[in-house]
Amino acid sequence: MSVFLFQNVSKSFKTYDGDFYALKHINLSLSSPGLLSIVGKSGSGKSTLLNLLTGIEKPSSGNLVFCNKPINKMSDRAFSKYHLKDISMVYQHYNLFDEMSAKENIYIPLLMQGLSRNKAEKKATEYLERFNLTYLSNQKVKTLSGGEKQRVAIIRAIITNPKVLLCDEPTGALDGENSDAIMSLLKDLSKDILVINVSHNRPLVEKYSDRIITLKDGEVVDDKVINEYKEINAISTSYKYSSSWTSLFTKLNLKLNLKKNLFSILACTVGFSAIFLSVGFYSGSQTSQENALRNNLSILHATASEKTFYEIENSPLSFEKMVRPSDELLRANLKEFKNIKYEPNLSYLFPNYPNGKYQDEIIENFQLIPLYDISLETFGKDLLVCGEPPSDVIDEVIVNEEFVKLINKRKEDVIDDLFNISYATSISYNTGDYENPLIKDDFSFDYDLRITAVVKEFSFLNTPKVYYSYPALKKELGTLYLENISDYQSEPVSYLDYIQDSDDDNQICSYSSEIFICSIDESSAFFEKIKKLSESESTFQIESQAYDIQQSYKTFIESFSTALFVFAIIAFLGVNFILGMISLSTFIENKKNSAILTCLGARNRSIQSIYLRENYIVVLVSIVISIFLAILLQFILNNLISKNFALDNLITIPFMSFYGYPFALPILLILIALVFSTIFTLTPMLIYRHMSIADELRDE
């Protein structure tokens, strides 16, 4: 039975001048055993014919059959078996793995056949001893001479006991003595198998060959049989394939690509750390909004107003005006809150932005905020950074750190310091009396306020604040009287009485009422109430500086989280793109090795796994490093944020539990990273896999 059968086989190549036929209408039957030599001048088609036999090039027309099976229609699995069990190739330029030892080069095909590492090494050692090459065992191939490389290549080719041995100019780079030794070896092997030898050396061919085929211009011009052997049927052998050998090449790539892999690890670590921190920011920001709400004394204070509409006489238009709400309206809208007080707004006489002076320096842009409980027993003691809460008197106050920065002092140095506030205004009383229509009283104050404590508040959009006792101010204004108005009404009228009894649309009442939250537990519900009122068409409205800050912070967090999410996606895709490009770069640099592996019997999937495994190692190492780096950065950033913004644990990376699943975040990131790494690594490799193996195996 013919081992190889050429049936009108032609092979052409595209050129600028049209199709060039390297082989034309070849009809041959090649049987086993024997030493068959193919000779001819350069360009006669010898190498092309050999490439067709190996299957790395396909016929343009005709059929090429191996043991009744068409070579050009082999699947990846069949092609692997064909090279691993049926044929072996000895190349003119050796095509060994230069960075591996001689022994490793020899036993790689055995690993592909499923032998264990120990058995494969033992068999390789036996063959090296048989050829007196033991001394080469652990030497890297790149250090060997041409003759040594050729013998190592032959050992690699025959160690798998192939049915056919293909040799491309096996003596081309050797001297006469070594050439004879190699041809003698091939002659011995040809007693049991078919050895096909392509050569220029006519004397050697005629000395050792059993059959000589001469090619010229792609055609068989002579087919000379010298010795006839009795044909033997090809023995079917069991086939087993293993991918264990790929670990050798992964280790080799990791070593050779150390700098590139370190760069990949650095890029991946930065990318994965950014992802962890982004998730940590998103996770921590959800609770930080509540913390931001509680890290501000002004949370306890708000004002309430009523929106009214006044018709314009003889016009379809009306104008809107804010007025102080009645007690009934306040009770009706705030009835669900048990710990809320509503009081007269006294800011007409004690304004939010008075004139200030500290150590003879003018102070501007600070705010006076009333507190119902200046002792901070209800809320706020945990915000104290130095000093003690004041007594319930008008001239002892609390300041925040922004105020301390405003006066350019250290917080420890301002305790018990005095700063002055002053203000002057007048109150006019319309009597309705034609002769004496308007009665006017002047009001002014000049207080030296003593700072007894400093609080650290959430600094986002926060301003310098001075907190004073509302009950103390109310008591103070209850003891001060409007002399002229009191004389006119013939009874004492205090400033407090006048504000309380004024019309709701009188500017002296500031068109609003003060609201004090006396329990921090109701703050969240109170803020929800503000939100509902602002979204509805209710005429009753509540204004809270703390609520405005919280809403602004929430908007900022949401916008920043969205930006971080986009950044995390870009970083993730960028990391995997870098991995894919580096993997492709490594693949391109080692594409000749990939071609050699293919011709040794390696499957495409196994070759791809070499580069995938390298990337997987980079990904896993990067994630492990990024976990520790993210934890460190989380600690550093949280300390900085807490110090500068009075906000604890803004970044909380959920390593231990993610959506209720333990360690879900790093596991999920690893899985996604491996999937994307696979896609980004394989896609360019699959595109590039259509490379010509024959071209890659030529000498570079």
Image: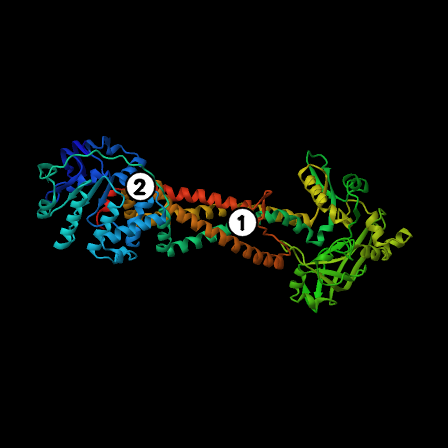
Q: Is residue 5 left or right of residue 480?
A: left
Which residue occupies the foreground of this view, 309 or 470? Answer: 470
Q: Nearer the viewer, mark 2 or mark 1?
A: 2
Secondary structure found at label 2: loop
Foreground residue, 345 or 428?
A: 345
Q: Position of residue 525 (x, y in %)?
A: 72, 43
Q: How is the image coloured?
A: rainbow
Quick one: quadrant of the N terminus? top left
Q: Within 10 angstroms of label 2, few (less than 14), some, or many (20 or more) residues?
A: some
Amino acid of disc 2: Arg
Q: Earlier in the sequence, mark 2 or mark 1?
A: 1
For label 1, count other residues whose C-alpha is less than 10 Å away and answer few (under 14), some (14-19) or many (20+): many
Q: Secondary structure at mark 1?
A: helix
Query: 569 or 255, which lies in front?
Result: 255
- Residue 202: where, in percent of width, then height? 9, 46
Q: Is residue 493 left or right of residue 466?
A: right
Above or below for 642 versus 698: below
Q: Which mark is residue 628?
A: none
Total labels drawn: 2
| Relative to 42, residue 18 above or below | above
Does the image show residue 216? no
Q: Residue at x 79, y 38 (%)?
A: 332
Instruction: Determine if residue 663 is in view.
Output: yes
Give how far across and how far down residue 31 sits, in percent.
17, 35
Which residue was labeled with disc 2?
Answer: 689
Q: Nearer the viewer, residue 553 or 221?
A: 221
For disc 1, the marked residue is: 278
Q: Position of residue 352 (x, y in %)?
A: 72, 55
